[in-house]
Image (cartoon, grey):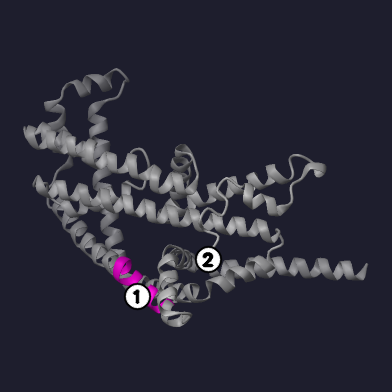
Amino acid sequence: MYDALERRSFLAMLVLVTLAFLLLMKPFAGPIFWAVAIALIFHPLQRVLIRRLGNRPNIVALLTLLTCMFIVVIPVIVLVSSLVAEGVSLYQQIQAGEIRPGEYIDRINASFPAIQGFLGQFNIDFAELRDRASNAFVGATQFFAKQALGFGQNTFQFFLGLALMVYLAFFLLRDGTRLVDLLIRALPLGDERERLLFNKFAEVTRATVKGNLLIALIQGALGGGIFWALGIQGALIWGVVMAIVSLLPAVGAALVWVPAALYLAAIGSIIPAIILTAFGVVVIGLADNVLRPILVGRDTKLPDYIVLLSTLGGIVMFGINGFVMGPLVAALFMAFWGIFMREFSEGEGTRRPTGATESASEGGAGGTGDQGGE
């Protein structure tokens, strides 16, 4: 009786201490998450370096991290700096009256009067819609300007988070295998189930980060390039905006280039409007429709509609990190329920052993069985 009380008291204290530790780490959730993502994404490179250089964990982890810095971190910092400068310039032009969103909407309406008639069928007042759209655009630029100003004021905090991410990524690259083995020993879910879940975590994180970011970079570069070629002002910032909205499946970059094509047609630039429309549908659209199922949906083994809903829900709940966390939660949800249905739904007499769970899983360890270091 006394032993049972001791055990329950210890488990209660264990839960409380764990929750306290998680709350302690909450302010650093972003750097920790992206450090884990870096360790997962660059693990294949780490294995190549191990084969070339031998078992020298510190040197291998350092070289892998330096590669990540040159490929990802430094270009992102340069792009963000350019985006901030471009965004502030756009905001100043709007404040000075050089850019008037309402006039652009009026030009589109004058060139396409059928739009107002179409909206009237649904009792939508075009003038009210125009004012709302104009105010929304101005509000968005004000928000962006505030974020840019806040970024400038919180430069130290940004670089502190960046340094923390790089520091953690080094140790995760070096000691990841031992950390995963330690977690498998500590968690009371059954070793085979835990390995399956860790493999699924690695698989989904790698697929969503690499897939979504690659698609975003491709669509942003293509969109910014065609805007620059057509002489549209602010090609850099619009390219970055297209890269950001391309994280939303199904709609993506069309939220930017479709209004731009309508405006070009409204002001009489018919040839540029046709070129932009054709380029957007054929090139930018295909980059999303072809690459996303290949890079994201196939590797995560999630249906396209689950990827869309989980991405949107993740962005709402977790912010920009949600484009990874949303599909990750959805994949783990399906993995847990898959284990439950295989092992428990058929009853005690027909329950499969845990070892059979991994071999029968839909995703299985799918090429990630060696991801212990992730």
Residue drawn at 32 percent across, 65 percent down: 72
Disc 1 secondary structure class: helix
Q: Name the amino acid type tagged 2.
A: Lys
Is residue 66 part of the magenta span, yes or no? yes
Write down the region rendered in magenta.
Answer: 61-73
- Answer few, some or many: residues within 10 Å of disc 2's Cα (few below 14, many 20 plus, some between 14 and 19): few
Residue 203: horizontal and vertical position, in percent? 50, 55
Left or right of 35? Residue 16 is right
Say which residue label 1 marks.
66
Residue 319: horizontal and vertical position, in percent? 43, 54
Left or right of 137? Residue 158 is right
Q: Please tell me whether the stretch drawn in magenta is mainly helix, strand or loop.
A: helix
- Answer few, some or many: residues within 10 Å of disc 1's Cα (few below 14, many 20 plus, some between 14 and 19): some
Q: Nearer the viewer, residue 78 or 212?
A: 212
Labels 1 & 2 near each other (Cβ < 8 A): no
Residue 305: horizontal and vertical position, in percent? 46, 37
Q: Name the amino acid type tagged 1.
A: Leu
Using the rendered view, name the quadrant where residue 162 is placed.
Answer: bottom left
Say which residue label 2 marks.
26
Is residue 52 part of the magenta span, yes or no? no
